[in-house]
Image (cartoon, rainbow, N blue to C red):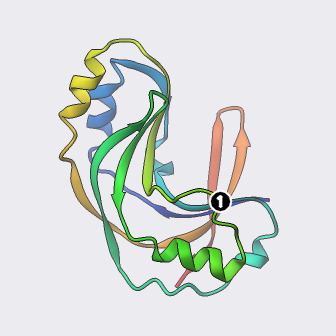
Amino acid sequence: MRLFIATPVQLPIYGAVKNSLSKYVDGKWVEGWNLHLTHKFIGDDDPEKYKDRLDVKKKSFKVKGIGTFGERVLYLKADIDNDINRQINEKFGLVNDKPFKPHVTLCRIKNIKDKKFWDELKKWENIEFEVPLEVYLYKSTLTKKGPVYEKIYKYE
């Protein structure tokens, strides 16, 4: 089973962000119900190995701003400490193979069709809102229409 640990994110202004920026890019936008902050991608494994308690002290985190990874991924910046990721790595014996850059993917960009994209992006630089910090083990099923995520365990 393809697994990852994440926090779901509800973005009330997602439609406005998407409408504003999609004029300037071709890409695959994440469905609103699939928005999440990935704490750890696990890959194919047995979910029973990951059903254990995590000490989630904070009750929320902030989304502060918007950015891109090069010209390929549009994301929201998440202002969250690394404690949960450290716990996940230690508790489940996972390798911390790359630095954690907390973010919520909005769109996988195929092509920036108009350079005005960068100016339009600046209009969303100061986006800021609070997100409840609920951490789940997810199952990810890849389909022709895109991934389908299912919560299978809540960490408390």
Q: Is residue 150 above or below residue 92?
A: above
Q: Which residue is mark 1?
A: 97
Q: Is 66 on the left-hand or right-hand side of 85?
A: left
Q: Residue at x 26, y 36 (%)?
A: 16
Q: Give the residue furthest to the top.
A: 113
Q: Position of residue 3 (x, y in %)?
A: 70, 60
Q: Quadrant of residue 9?
A: bottom left
Q: Is residue 133 above or below residue 68?
A: below
Q: Residue at x 29, y 21 (%)?
A: 117
- The quarter of the picture where the N terminus appears is bottom right
Q: Is 25 on the left-hand or right-hand side of 4?
A: left
Q: How many marks?
A: 1
Decide: few, some or many residues near mark 1? Use Cα within 10 Å; few <14, some 14-19, many ≥20. few
Q: Position of residue 139 (x, y in %)?
A: 69, 60
* Nearest the eye: 96 or 60: 96
Q: Is 85 on the left-hand or right-hand side of 19?
A: right
Question: Disc 1 marks which amino acid?
Answer: Asp
Q: Is 116 on the left-hand or right-hand side of 94?
A: left
